[in-house]
Structure formats: C-alpha cells, structure tokens
Image (spheres, rainbow, N blue to C red):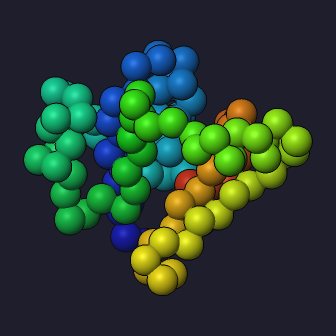
Amino acid sequence: MEEQRCLVCGIRDGILDEIIKRSLLENNIKVHSCDKGLDNMLEASGDDDSYMIVSLDKKQLPDKYTEIFNKNNDLIVVELLNNGKSLGLYMNDINEFVLNKIIQINL
C-alpha cells in the first residue's frame, strides 16, 4: 500500500489540531504542517500529498446553509462544483468520528 500524507495548515486551536493529527495517524497517514501558516501553503504542499486540511478564518458558512443547519443540525451539504469536477462539503459541529469517516473516503 502506498504511503499517504496530509498537509495540515492554519489550525490554531490546539485541541482541534491534535484531534485532526491523531485521526490521520490512526489511519496510517503521515502528517506534515505549514511552518509559516497559510502564506506558505503552496510551497508546503507536495505531489505526494493525498489530503490537505486547511483552516480558513475568513471563510464563512453561506447564510442559506446557516439557516438550513438551524433547521437540521445533522444535515450534510454536498456541493458539486465546476460541473461535477470538484466537490465542496459542509457539515455543522463536526466531531472526531465524522472526521475519521471523511479521512477514510480516500483510503
């Protein structure tokens, strides 16, 4: 089995950072981080990365999704972008179990 790697960048919350890294390691995925934060993300990412987990402070959940999550907190919103060439995933109150399931999608 080919070794998988993940770039983790911009996670400022130490507890969340540990949960993410532990989940990756439990799934036999090597972890490396952006030393200089988001500004160094492009240089830090490599062709051998299978995952990239990035925390963006300025990106906000669209208002329409906020209203939907207020009605159904357990909903998963999947956006198909660029005519199905890309996918966006929105979830509310993600937990460690769900994070592990998302990481396992690419295994």
The answer to whether residue 3 is left or right of residue 80 is left
Q: Is residue 10 left or right of residue 98?
A: left
Pick out the residue farthest to the top.
Answer: 14
User: Which image quadrant is residue 96 in?
Assistant: top right
Residue 89 lies in quadrant: bottom right
Q: Can residue 6 be seen in this view?
A: yes
Q: In this view, does 81 lie to the left or right of 37?
A: right
Name the residue: 63% across, 41% down.
Answer: 63
Q: Does 38 appear above or below 107?
A: above
Q: Where is residue 86 in the image (x, y as percent from the top left)?
A: 45, 72
Is residue 91 found left or right of 87 in the rendered image? right
**Seen from this angle, which residue lies furthest bottom?**
83
Residue drawn at x 80%, y 51% as measured from the top left:
75
Q: Can see residue 97?
A: no
> Considering only vertical position in the picture, is 77 above or below 58?
below
Quarter holding the C terminus is bottom right
In the rendering, at what x and y percent does residue 65 appear?
68, 47
- Residue 64 position in % (x across, y down): 68, 47
Quadrant location of the N terminus? Answer: bottom left
In the image shown, does 87 or 16 lie closer to the viewer?
Answer: 87
105, above or below 92, in the image: below
Determine the residue positioned at 51% across, 68% down: 87
For the point 53% across and 60% down, which residue is it?
88
Closest to the observer, 83 or 54 = 83
In this picture, is 93 found above or below 100? above
Determine the residue located farthest toward the right in the rendered image.
71
Q: How many numbered discs, if any?
A: 0
